[in-house]
Image (tube, rainbow, N blue to C red):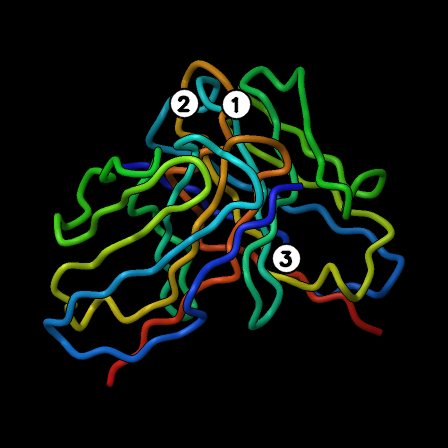
Amino acid sequence: DIQMTQSPSSLSASVGDSVTITCRASQSIRIYLNWYQQKPGKAPKVLIYAASSLQSGVPSRFSGSGSGTDFTLTISSLQPEDFATYYCQQSYSTPPTFGQGTKVEIK
Amino acid sequence: EVQLVESGGGLVQPGGSLRLSCSASGFTFSNYAMHWVRQAPGKGLEYVSAISRNGGSTYNADSVKGRFTISRDNSNNMLYLQMSSLRAEDTAVYYCVRDRSTVDTTYNFDYWGQGALVTVSS
């Protein structure tokens, strides 16, 4: 199975800050990388697919980049509604696997 | 509007069985592969099962292989997960998830249901 490792596991930031979350795959997954946001008690919501494609309806302050084994999710200007847990997921091979999550908290 | 609504969760004893259902609406159900993904309390996301658009092909994670069966009824826009020989470690919220593609099973997810809690405990 492909292992997905996110860093950091958690971070504290203020409204307006730029935030970057990193996801590393244990082998190349080309651009088969997706990012999800999950708020407490809610289902995950897709933000970015195919490494850098913004899901319809998602604010443009969210962006993704990377290919191969190293990927990043950037939130350019953190808003109050962005405090949540973020997961990366590879769709390159079965089983699809998720990172352990990055919790973004209010500083 | 795409909607996925799970039902059938609850408390079951170890070794018992349970069937989850997912009612789909707002899209042509038979055009999309479907999946189940679970999340244990306070933990991360774990992939469970997939089924192709016509139901002819399925995939199960090793952790549930031989115990869980995914199926679908395209006439009624329903997805199912039959779970048997349940263990404490199967305790989780189970999400019904749509594949993004109308061409193939890509394991790239775009819509998620609200989830159904399954608790395995004596």
Q: Position of residue A94 (x, y in %)?
A: 62, 33
Instruction: Please report, as a chain letter, where disc 1 is located.
Output: B
Categorize mark 1 by other alpha carbons within 10 Å: few (<14), some (14-19), many (20+): many
Give the left or right position of residue B116, taking residue B89 as reference.
left
Q: Which residue is mark 1?
A: B105
Extreme residue toward the bottom, this view: A107
Comparing labels 1 and 3, the label whose residue is closer to the camera: 1
Please report the residue visible at 13 percent of the width from the left and 54 percent of the height from the top: A61
Q: Which mark is residue B9?
A: 3
Label 1 to label 3: alpha-carbon separation: 26 Å
Q: Earlier in the sequence, mark 1 or mark 3?
A: 3
Give the image quarter of residue A48.
top left
Q: Which mark is residue B38?
A: none
Please report the residue visible at 55 percent of the width from the left and 62 percent of the height from the top: B44
Between B111 and A12, the one lying in front of the other is: A12
Q: Which mark is residue B101?
A: 2
Please report the residue visible at 63 percent of the width from the left and 57 percent of the height from the top: B9
Callouts 1 and 3 close, C-beta under 8 Å: no
Location of the N terminus of chain B (image quadrant)? top left
Label 2 to label 1: alpha-carbon separation: 7 Å
Residue type at the position of mark 1: Thr
Residue type at the position of mark 2: Ser
Callouts 2 and 1 close, C-beta under 8 Å: yes
Categorize mark 3 by other alpha carbons within 10 Å: few (<14), some (14-19), many (20+): some
